Amino acid sequence: MLRISKKLMFAIEAVLDIAYNAGTEPVQSGEITRRQGIPKRYLEQVLQQLVRDGVLAGVRGPRGGYRLARERRRITLGEIVRVVRSMETASDPIEEPAGSILGHKVVRPLWGELQEETMKQLDTITIEDLCMRARAAGVESETEDRIDFTI
């Protein structure tokens, strides 16, 4: 079931922070914690999963951290939602066998359709879109270098 969990909000905020504040150097998790107030215990777990799933790239070393694995315009909210949902252990009530005939024939199919439509919408919203919203809202970036390209 699609729900906005703390982990999901932290993941979206962390990816947006990396995109919005990244310059030429990777963004360290401590910087994200400082700017966003995301508890480090949640943040590291989410960042590592986003690296494994190809949303972020991890850079090792004393000046290491995280950067986007692709351009901002190629990473969608739907992708981040799928990564976080794969981490969550709670079962989806739609998939549980128990329930009434009305639930199985009417409510669950409707809920599935709504979830599918929501995911389609989230697949159209990119990190670039969120960066533009942040600029329009007057959110300051910690870097003046907002170049976003891949060679």
Image (cartoon, rainbow, N blue to C red):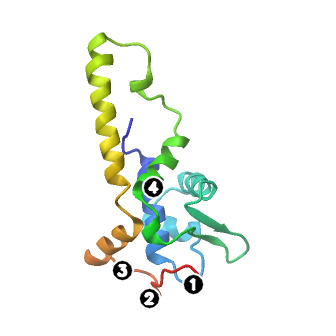
- Residue at 31 percent across and 26 percent down: it is 109
Please state which of residues 61 and 92 is positioned toward the viewer in this rendering. 92
In the image, is 47 to the left or to the right of 124?
A: right
- First along the sequence among labels 3 and 4: 4
**Few, some or many residues within 10 Å of mark 2 (<14, 14–19, 20+):** few
In the image, is 80 to the left or to the right of 133?
A: right
**What is the three-letter code of the residue carrying label 2?**
Glu
User: What residue does disc 3 label?
Assistant: 140
Q: How far is the residue under mark 3 from the one under mark 2? A: 10 Å
User: What residue does disc 4 label?
Assistant: 10
**What is the three-letter code of the residue carrying label 4?**
Phe
Residue 68 appears at what percent x and percent y?
Answer: 54, 69
- The local secondary structure at tag 4 comes to helix
User: What residue does disc 1 label?
Assistant: 24
Front label number (3 vs 2): 2
User: What residue does disc 2 label?
Assistant: 144
**Few, some or many residues within 10 Å of mark 4 (<14, 14–19, 20+):** many
In the image, is 124 to the left or to the right of 26?
A: left
